[in-house]
Image: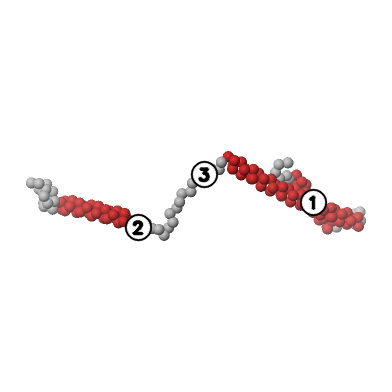
Amino acid sequence: MPHANPIQRQPNRPAARTMRWFTLRLVRACACLAAMAALAGAQQQTPNLSRPIPIPVITVPPDPNQQMEMHEQAQKDKSANFAAANAERKKQISDDSARLLKLATELKEEVDNTTKDTLSVAVIRKADEIERLAHNVKQKMKLTVGKS
């Protein structure tokens, strides 16, 4: 006898097994219908225009002449920065040298006013300050920024 009704008890299948088979088929059919309805609904929706659509940016590399001009401009900017740094360094050396000269003359006057056997703490501190300042001036003179 052909399988006309799956719920009817088949001779080789128990009734509970037939019910499970039928339930499984019904659930699968409902799931397929739900998926098809969701796809149909998604196709009918209008696009969300509240967010702007990003436009891809295509960058074109500059031609060789533009690249050369950009490189030359960068070199000019760099050399201008080097010149400014060197000018600042020379100004600092000049200011520190003037201060060094002033401190050295003050130290000489103080040493001339003291006796041969005594030195004050202020004289020793001033000598240390002169030493540090002279070291800093020497380091700044060694420093060169950019090409020589």
Upstream in the sequence, badge 2 or badge 3? 2
The local secondary structure at tag 1 comes to helix
Upstream in the sequence, badge 1 or badge 3? 3
Can you see residue 31? no
Q: Position of residue 23 (x, y in %)?
A: 19, 54
Judge by depth and name the residue closer to the eye, 80 or 66.
66
The quadrant in which the C terminus is found is: top right
Which label is found at residue 46? Answer: 2
Q: Residue furthest top?
A: 64
Judge by depth and name the residue closer to the eye, 35 or 47.
47
| Disc 2 to disc 3: CB gap under 8 Å | no
Three-letter amino acid code at disc 2?
Thr
Q: How is the image coloured?
A: secondary structure
Q: Residue furthest bottom?
A: 50
Name which residue lies at 42% across and 58% down.
51
Judge by depth and name the residue closer to the eye, 105 or 73.
73
Mark 1 and mark 3: Cα distance apart in space: 50 Å
**Which residue, given by chain and number where applicable, does mark 3 sit on?**
60
Q: What crowding class fits label 2: few (fewer than 14 Cα within 10 Å), some (14-19), or many (20 or more)?
A: few
Upstream in the sequence, badge 2 or badge 1? 2
The local secondary structure at tag 2 comes to loop
Left or right of 77 in this view: 134: right
Q: Position of residue 50 (x, y in %)?
A: 41, 60
Query: Which-is-in-front pick, marks 2 and 1?
Result: 2
Mark 2 and mark 3: Cα distance apart in space: 35 Å
Tell me: residue 66, above or below residue 53: above
Q: Residue furthest left?
A: 1
**Which residue, given by chain and number where applicable, does mark 1 sit on?**
94
Three-letter amino acid code at disc 1?
Ser
Judge by depth and name the residue closer to the eye, 66 or 78.
66
Can you see residue 63? yes
